[in-house]
Amino acid sequence: MSRWPKVLASIAFALTALVLPASAQTYPTRAVTLVVPYPPGGGVDAMARIVAEKLSHALGQQVVVDNRGGGGGLIGTRAVARAAPDGYTLLLGHTGTMSINPSLYASPGFDPRKDFAAIGLIASMPVVLIAHPSFPAKTIREVIALAKKEAGKLNIGTSAVGTGGYMSAELFKSVTGTQVNLIPYKGTAPVMNDLLGGHVPIAFGVIPPALGNLQSGALRAIAVASPRRTALLPDVPTFAESGLPDFEAVLHYGLLAPAGTPRPIIERLNAELRNLVADEEVKKRIHLEGGDPLTSSADEYTADVDKEETKWSTLIRKLNLKVE
């Protein structure tokens, strides 16, 4: 008789071990919330809506986009970090929120490595150096030469402090050793308007807001900060091709869950995410938003967040940048 408690305990343990795989097989049984830590209308929101539509179909449950803007992306990101790790609250992650904000802000309220479980990458979007047609320099080498010849005189427009465009401009200054003036604007639209008007000669930004003007010739792209040329601007060289092999600034978009989310659920979501990003219609929609489709395993996305955070935090500390 003394053996029965041990036998029963072994059976209970075995049944517990089966719970997680079973939960993944039945997951989800209700709607899933996909948090976008920015207002509607931006690039992160656009990626989320592409994913939500297709993921709803794949999971058999509605994936609802919840825009929780504010605090430069901190409010929505914190909310997901503190949510129950059950697979029903997800985050549309972005280089700004996961790799720049944690070091840029004095009190971000989350740790990108400890508070999240990466699911997988969705897309990448390179930063581009864009010029007004009247700007004399046509290549990166010519921009650097001009900046060094007229030290302290060249103005470069960017979006707000801490954004991908702004950090790319800071990286450019650091890598090239040039003395240029960064002019941060409150958003992407004001930068593009002043660039079109010739009020700033060049600017760092992402492709979508400028694409129409680039195609019409109202603006000119000098180089893209990606490892390879982008499909949207196939004739524009990379910074590496242009003589700056160490210069890379690519915004990554991916899906994350709160830390502690069961691994089988992470793997289920990763498999569905890979399938939907491989879909030709989804690829087309990502291209239209200015991105390049990108897939990964959960572990590869975890490594990507680590690599990008290390890169940008090193620059932020070097420049002593802080936002309260």
Image: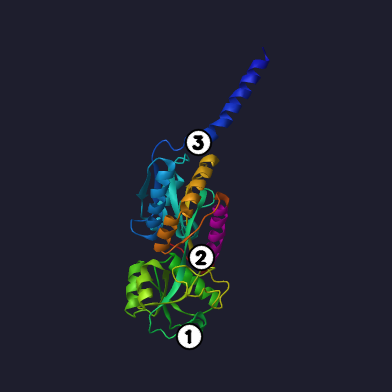
Quadrant in the rendering for residue 181: bottom left
The amino acid at mark 2 is Ile
Q: Earlier in the sequence, mark 3 or mark 2?
A: 3
Residue at image position (41%, 49%) is 54
Badge 2 local density, few (<14 within 10 Å), some, or many (20+)?
A: many
Residue at image position (63%, 24%) is 10
Q: Is residue 309 magenta?
A: yes
Give the residues in magenta: 300-316
Judging depth in this view, the residue of 56 and 124 nearest the camera is 56
Q: Earlier in the sequence, mark 2 or mark 1?
A: 1
Q: CA distance from mark 3 to mark 2?
A: 43 Å
Q: Marks 3 and 2: which is nearer the front?
A: 3
Dot 1: what SS?
Answer: helix
Q: Is residue 301 above or below residue 15?
A: below
Q: Which residue is mark 3?
A: 25
Q: CA distance from mark 2 to mark 1?
A: 26 Å
Res. 316 mark: 2
Where is residue 190 shown, x and y percent of the image? 33, 70
Res. 146 mark: 1
